[in-house]
Amino acid sequence: MTDLAEPDSAVVRPSLLELFLAFAHVALSGFGGALPWARRMIVERKRWMTAEEFNEDFALSQFLPGPNVVNFSVVFGARIAGAAGAAVAFVGLMGPPLVIVTILAVLYRHYGDLEALSRILSGIGAAAAGLIVAMTIKMALPLFHRRIGWPAVIAIIAFIGVAIMRWPLPLVLVVLAPFAFALAWFYPAGTVKR
């Protein structure tokens, strides 16, 4: 089985310490975007949730105000251990980068004009873009495994609307959300045979 599929074993529930350390690791690994690292850690490495559960929680995180990965950490932490889990995941995700960014801001103020630094930051940006593309593919795969292809159709229509037609994302969400909610209501996850 490849790492693109859902894990076979039962879902494992982490302790608060494991939750904190995992999100701290995600935060320290996620240059340019922590979400691909969060998915890899939660679904593939730790097997704390399935790919479909990740997609569901991530979809909820996108509707909440604020950065998606921060919202996801709170939603996931709350799923694992209630308010304490939400707080621990949030602090694990935000604490280490806050300290590092503060130190880097002071250093950048003094050394920001160096040409080598500009090249390094360009390389980090390219790597982050690659991670986002890989995560997008991994998140889309579970949508295409169902007999009823409605999640895939919604995803394709959203992609066409935003990326090709260049319609505003809020407009696409407002138009597609009622259809997605209705389809999810009448065809809930787990009722479709593969």
Image: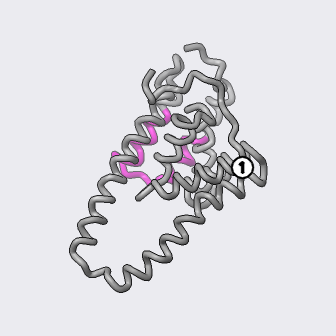
Q: Position of residue 105 (x, y in %)?
A: 44, 78
Instruction: Say if 117 sits above or below 187 in the image.
Output: below
Q: Check if residue 173 falls in the magenta segment.
A: yes
> Which quadrant: the N terminus?
top left
Q: Chief secondary structure of the magenta span?
A: helix
Q: Which residue is mark 1?
A: 16
**Could you tell me residue 176's position as x and y percent?**
54, 41
Looking at the image, is 63 positioned above or below residue 141? below
Q: Relative to 185, does residue 172 appear above or below in the rendering?
A: below
Badge 1 element? helix
* Residue 171 locus on image (x, y percent): 51, 51
Q: Would you say residue 98 is visible in this rendering?
A: yes
**Number of numbered tags placed on the structure image:** 1
As rendered, which of 29 and 134 lies closer to the eye? Answer: 29
Looking at the rendering, the stretch of residues picked out in magenta corresponds to: 154-177
Type of amino acid under label 1: Leu
Estimate how packed mark 1 is, as few (under 14), some (14 to 19) or many (20 or more) residues with alpha carbons within 10 Å: some
Which residue shows up at 65% across the image and 61% down it? 91
Residue 107 figure quarter: bottom left
* Visible residue check, residue 55: no
Q: Residue sitting at 64 percent across and 30 percent down?
A: 184
Q: Percent x, y for residue 15?
A: 71, 44
Point out the image quarter for the C terminus: top right
Asked if the stretch drawn in magenta spans residue 7, the answer is no
Color theme of the render: one colour
